[in-house]
Image: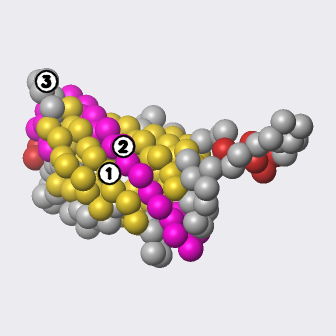
Amino acid sequence: MPVKQWNVGDVLNAADMDTWTVPLAAIKPSGQPVSNNTLVNDSALVLPVAANAFYAIEALIQYNALAGGDIKWTFTIPASASGFYGVTVSPAGGGFAGGAAFAWTDTYNGIGSGVSTPMNVRIHGILNTAGTAGNLQFRWAQNTTNATPTTVMANSALIGQQIG
């Protein structure tokens, strides 16, 4: 879908405002602990996306990975959707770890801290939904099963802005 062009005198209706000026946003209201390495849908980080659209996607995921459980994640996307994202992880003690372009359905093995210091993951990408509407769903688990849970923390966010 091309970006909408308005002409002088056009009236902006509610649908145009919602589509082109209001971002989609999902913010975690509370932490979610997981103690195994089987990917699960995040309880809050999901965005409904339209068919035949391009979205600029950003996410800030904060997590604790105590005792070596670490974290891994992927996304579920609508059928025939495509695109890519890059990731930056801020581990405890400073420094950064990053990744090149990943397909939305690739599984990324993150980094754990082994201490109670939260870790931050920044995700920036483009999603092209093609002909099918659906959900962009954050999925995650421990990278290595551990009895001490990995927790994706409250206020983590997934944001999408339609750009085409």
Q: What residue do we see at 40% from left, 56% from top? A: 138
Q: Earlier in the sequence, mark 2 or mark 1?
A: 1
Q: Which x, y percent locates residue 9? A: 89, 37
Q: Is residue 111 above or below residue 34?
A: above
- Judging from the image, what secondary structure is the residue with disc 2 in? strand
Q: Does residue 5 appear to the left or right of 38 in the view shown? A: right
Q: Read off the residue under disc 1.
A: 85
Q: Which x, y percent locates residue 36? A: 22, 61
Span colored in magenta: 111-135
The mark closer to the camera, 3 or 2, is 2
The N terminus lies in quadrant: bottom right
Q: Which x, y percent locates residue 137? A: 45, 60
Q: Read off the residue under disc 2.
A: 124
Q: Is residue 130 visible?
A: yes
Residue neighbourhood size for the residue with mark 3, other residues' Cα within 10 Å, grouped as few (<14), some (14–19), many (≥20): few
Q: Earlier in the sequence, mark 3 or mark 2?
A: 3
Q: Is residue 49 visible?
A: no
The kind of residue on which mark 1 rests is: Tyr
Q: What residue do we see at 45% from left, 47% from top? A: 57
Residue neighbourhood size for the residue with mark 2, other residues' Cα within 10 Å, grouped as few (<14), some (14–19), many (≥20): some
Say the numbered circle drawn on residue 24: none
Q: Is 124 covered by the magenta stretch?
A: yes
Q: Quadrant of residue 116?
A: top left
Q: Is residue 105 above or below residue 126?
A: below
**Label 3, label 2: how many angstroms apart (C-alpha)?**
21 Å
> In the depicted view, which residue is nearer to us: 46 or 125?
125
Q: What residue do we see at 38% from left, 38% from top? A: 60
The kind of residue on which mark 3 rests is: Gly
Say the numbered circle drawn on residue 94: 3
> In the depicted view, which residue is nearer to us: 70 or 99?
99
